[in-house]
């Protein structure tokens, strides 16, 4: 068995262990160190000190020297270096800051005010309650970037309101599930930060490139919600004056000024400072975290318990991301050293694919991986396998990254493993079946596919803003 075969066996064992439910980060580290011990095995180097011992050395000294030599394998040096590289990565520093901003905003009771205000402001629009829920989801998802938190909170807040307003239960469930996943794509997306760290693409260009596709997807969602409300009024009845009373315009504006605009201003300030070069992503994230605390304090929701819980959740999620990177870097370094990347490149090159066919194949694989795996695991572990292949097909990694971000929307929305549906089912009223949620999700899944087709057909949707702000590629 040659080294390349060992590398492929290493990848196969990893996939099997992940499907068996082993923790991904520690599985990566264990396989990386285990196969790395074989890959970097050098008996002469490892037991040099033991071989130089005098013949009359005592047994204890000999045993200790031999044991030390067993750990003198270069894989341990690689593991330490990769750990240091990840922990000192400036791009990843923005992750805990954005997470903290999201968690503190989530606990500040902002979403309840925001949904109520938008519900009143949009009362004359077809499907007003659905439009309000979708915009609230989009804004909250953008602020937090955590799909489970958005879907769960909006499921407790907006779903009962829509059901009470006689909305079709599948339609209402689909709106919340689809809206909750938007934070993966729309900047300041944590997923794009992780992709930037894994691929070496500028996070600033990624944010600029994701803006139009994200807004396009939101626009398609809104068109579908309003269109269905007009064509099928029973699915989204217009609210009566008893359900949503008429509110004078000055009062509506005041409600927007105290609920919608503060959160929107925080997001736009963070995103604008990055896009216009006023601050690095890390600096902007730190301002966002501070702004989230000020916002929570302004709403009188900044208690010590909420602050402590936000810090705890931030540390836990950040540690998960960092250890995934450590495991992935170690695993991929050993995999590459054994020749695994070369074998995959040769195999894909031998298929004689066109760039479009390669993109479709890659997106299909990522789509299937989205069923059993989280987006963080896909970005950190599997996307780097595709990155070396992009130059073969003259594909810009920026374009590929935005496509992946769009694709991961489908992984949260595709039955039978649609995680957003399970998040919603956990908090939905007893009358909402999982099949109802799946049924409501399908039209939004079609909108995601339409967005991907538009990106394939009109790549300038991705490249226009990066080229406008920072010059042509």
Image: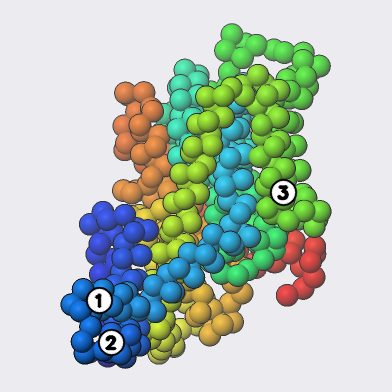
Q: Which mark is residue 53?
A: 2
* Mark toward the viewer: 3 or 2: 2
Q: Is residue 246 above or below residue 290?
A: above
Between marks 1 and 3, how big is the CA–CA gap? 56 Å
- Give the quadrant of the N terminus: bottom left
Residue found 48% across the figure and 64% down from its top: 83
**Secondary structure state at the residue bearing disc 1:** helix
Q: Quadrant of residue 293?
A: top right
- Decide which of 155, 337 is in the foreground and name it: 337
Between marks 3 and 2, how big is the CA–CA gap? 58 Å
In the rendered structure, the answer to whether residue 280 lies left or right of residue 24 reads right
> Which residue bears the numbered disc 3?
284
Q: Quadrant of residue 249?
A: top right
- Decide which of 62, 219 is in the foreground and name it: 62
Furthest toward the top, the residue is: 242
> Which residue bears the numbered disc 1?
61
Residue found 46% across the figure and 25% down from its top: 156
Q: Are marks 1 and 2 in contact (CB under 8 Å)?
A: yes
Q: Is residue 51 above or below residue 233?
A: below
Residue found 36% across the figure and 39% down from its top: 422
Answer few, some or many: residues within 10 Å of disc 1's Cα (few below 14, many 20 plus, some between 14 and 19): few
Please report whichever mark, 1 or 2, sits nearer to the chain's N-terminal start. 2
* Mark toward the viewer: 1 or 3: 1
């Amino acid at each position: 068995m040659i080294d390349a075969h060992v590398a492929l066996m290493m990848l196969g064992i990893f996939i099997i262990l992940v499907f068996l439910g082993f923790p991904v980060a520690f599985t990566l580290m264990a396989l990386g160190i285990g196969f790395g011990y074989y890959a970097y095995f050098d008996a002469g180097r490892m037991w040099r000190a033991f071989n130089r011992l005098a013949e009359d050395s005592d047994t204890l000294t000999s045993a200790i020297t031999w044991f030390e030599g067993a750990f003198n394998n270069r894989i341990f040096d690689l593991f330490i270096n990769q750990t240091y590289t990840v922990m000192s990565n400036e791009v990843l520093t923005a992750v805990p800051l954005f997470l903290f901003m999201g968690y503190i905003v989530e606990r500040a009771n902002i979403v309840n005010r925001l949904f109520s205000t938008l519900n009143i402001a949009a009362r004359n629009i077809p499907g007003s309650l659905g439009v309000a829920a979708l915009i609230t989801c989009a804004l909250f998802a953008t602020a937090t970037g955590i799909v489970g938190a958005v879907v769960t909170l909006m499921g407790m807040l907006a779903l009962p309101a829509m059901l009470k307003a006689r909305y079709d239960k599948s339609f209402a469930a689909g709106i919340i599930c689809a809206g909750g996943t938007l934070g993966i794509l729309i900047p300041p997306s944590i997923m794009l930060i992780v992709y930037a760290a894994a691929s070496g693409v500028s996070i600033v260009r990624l944010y600029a490139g994701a803006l139009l596709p994200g807004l396009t997807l939101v626009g398609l969602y809104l068109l579908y919600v309003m269109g269905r409300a007009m064509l099928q009024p029973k699915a989204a009845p217009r609210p009566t004056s008893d359900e949503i009373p008429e509110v004078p315009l000055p009062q509506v504006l005041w409600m927007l000024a105290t609920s919608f605009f503060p959160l929107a201003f925080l997001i736009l300030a963070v995103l604008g400072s990055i896009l216009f070069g006023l601050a690095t992503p890390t600096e902007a994230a730190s301002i966002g975290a501070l702004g989230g605390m000020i916002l929570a304090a302004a709403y009188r929701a900044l208690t010590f318990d909420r602050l402590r819980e936000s810090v705890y959740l931030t540390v836990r999620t950040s540690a998960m991301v960092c250890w995934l990177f450590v495991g992935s870097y170690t695993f991929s370094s050993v995999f590459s050293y054994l020749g695994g990347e070369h074998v995959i490149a040769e195999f894909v090159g031998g298929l004689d694919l066109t760039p479009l066919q390669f993109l479709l194949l890659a997106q299909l694989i990522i789509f299937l991986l989205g069923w059993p795996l989280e987006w963080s695991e896909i970005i950190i572990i599997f996307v780097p396998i595709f990155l070396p292949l992009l130059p073969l097909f003259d594909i810009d990694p920026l374009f590929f990254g935005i496509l992946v971000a769009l694709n991961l929307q489908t992984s949260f929305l595709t039955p039978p493993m649609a995680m957003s549906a399970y998040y919603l089912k956990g908090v939905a009223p007893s009358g909402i079946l999982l099949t109802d949620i799946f049924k409501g999700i399908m039209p939004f899944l079609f909108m995601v596919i339409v967005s991907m087709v538009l990106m394939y057909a009109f790549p300038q949707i991705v490249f226009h803003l990066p080229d406008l702000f920072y010059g042509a590629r």
